[in-house]
Each structure stands twice: as structure tokens, then as C-alpha cells.
Image (tube, grey):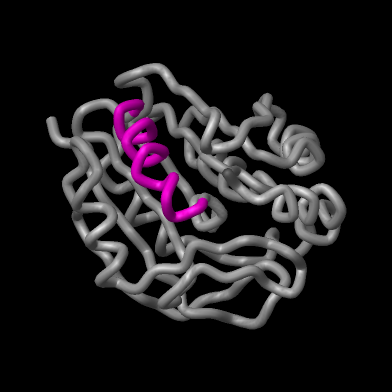
Amino acid sequence: MTGDGTVAFYEREADAYFRSTLKNDLTDLYRLFLECLPEGGLILDAGSGSGRDTLSFLRAGYRVEAFDASARLASLSEEMTGIRVDVARFETWRGAPDRYAGIWCFASLLHVRNAELPAVLDRLVASLKPGGSFFASFKWGERSTVDERGRCFTNLTPDTARELFEGVQGLELTRIWAEGGPTALSDPTTWIYVLGRRRG
């Protein structure tokens, strides 16, 4: 499961993390994710963190449901966005089938241990409507790591990301790419972005 040290960090540093994430501009990534979604479609912000992305989707006219493993971050997100944020971990989350027009996992799935990712991804994609859009991001790396703050990371390269996501039941990969970008509390990093669609 997502390491207790990871959740403990976000509980302890929720306020600083919340403030830090709000300044990051993800406009280009939003555009890629949203371009095939129906107007007003329902999005799941999975591992929603500060609620920054939830708020952006709401302002763009979409409906949003969200969950996060940190109760403190969920509370801060609720205050900012005005919607309920469930407290749940990816490993225990269960969603209704064929529910969402899009599922957004920005810098969240990377805290799920590699051995548990396939089952988590299968459940997420099963909750997409046919044709629904899926987005995830990971830090670039050859192996899993634990940072100086005690957070566990499953890192991927473009090749290992492709291998992982090609094995997800019902998912058609659209694009996998590496790109430099900001992090919330650390120096800029190289991100691995994954964009896909549930087969119709």
C-alpha cells in the first residue's frame, strides 16, 4: 500500500503543500486531457491533493468527484472548491463502473507501490465510460525511491510506463512523453506523462 510515511508527510505538511501547489500552471496538460471530454462531463480527480486541479475543472464547466489519502488535504480542498472530497487510498478505492468521462491522476499514482499499480489501474479504467480520457504522471526514474521527507515514489521511464499501461485492461494508450516541469516542494523534475482512453 501507499506507505504510511507518505500519508504522514501530507498530513503534517498539508498547509505548506497546499500553498505551494497553487502556483503551478498546468494549462497545456488540462487541454490535452479535456479536449475529447463532453461538455459538463464528470471527472474523477484521483489523489486530488490541494484541489487545484479540481477547481480548474469546475471553473471550466465540468462536474468533479475527488478523493485523497490525506484527510487534512481533503479538508483544505473542500474549503477551496466547495465539493466533498472523500478520504481514500488508491489501493482501497472502489468506483462504479462506466461512471466517469475522465480520470485525472496528477502526481498521485506515483505513491502506489509498483506491485499494486496494475490492479489499481484496472479498477480506475473500469470506472471510465467507453471513450473516457485517462491521465497520469510519474517522476522519471529507473527504480522506486523514498525521498528525504519519507515519501515513497514509484518512478517510471517512458519504456517502463509503456510496458505498465499496455497491460491495463481496456485502456488504449494515446501518448507517453517525458517533459520537465515544476514540483510542489522540490526542485523541477522530469515528469513522465501518460494519456489514454478507454476502448469503446
Q: Position of residue 173 (x, y in %)?
A: 19, 53
Location of residue 58 by image quarter: top right
**Would you say residue 117 sits in the magenta stretch?**
yes
User: Horizontal placement of 147 versus 132: left or right?
Assistant: right
Main SS of the magenta part reads helix
* Residue sticking out furthest to the left: 200
**Would you say residue 115 sits in the magenta stretch?**
yes
Residue located at (49% from left, 51% from top) = 109
Residue located at (64% from left, 38% from top) = 68
Position of residue 25 relative to residue 51, above or below, is below
User: Horizontal placement of 90 versus 101: left or right?
Assistant: right
Q: Quadrant of the C terminus?
A: top left
Residue located at (52% from left, 28% from top) = 93
Task: State the count of labels.
Answer: 0
Q: Quadrant of the N terminus?
A: top right
Q: Position of residue 3 (x, y in %)?
A: 66, 51
Q: Position of residue 70 (x, y in %)?
A: 73, 41
User: Horizontal placement of 95 versus 34: left or right?
Assistant: right
> Which residues, given as a range, are shown in magenta?
113-127
Identify which residue, 51 or 193, lies in the foreground: 193
Residue located at (39% from left, 68% from top) = 156
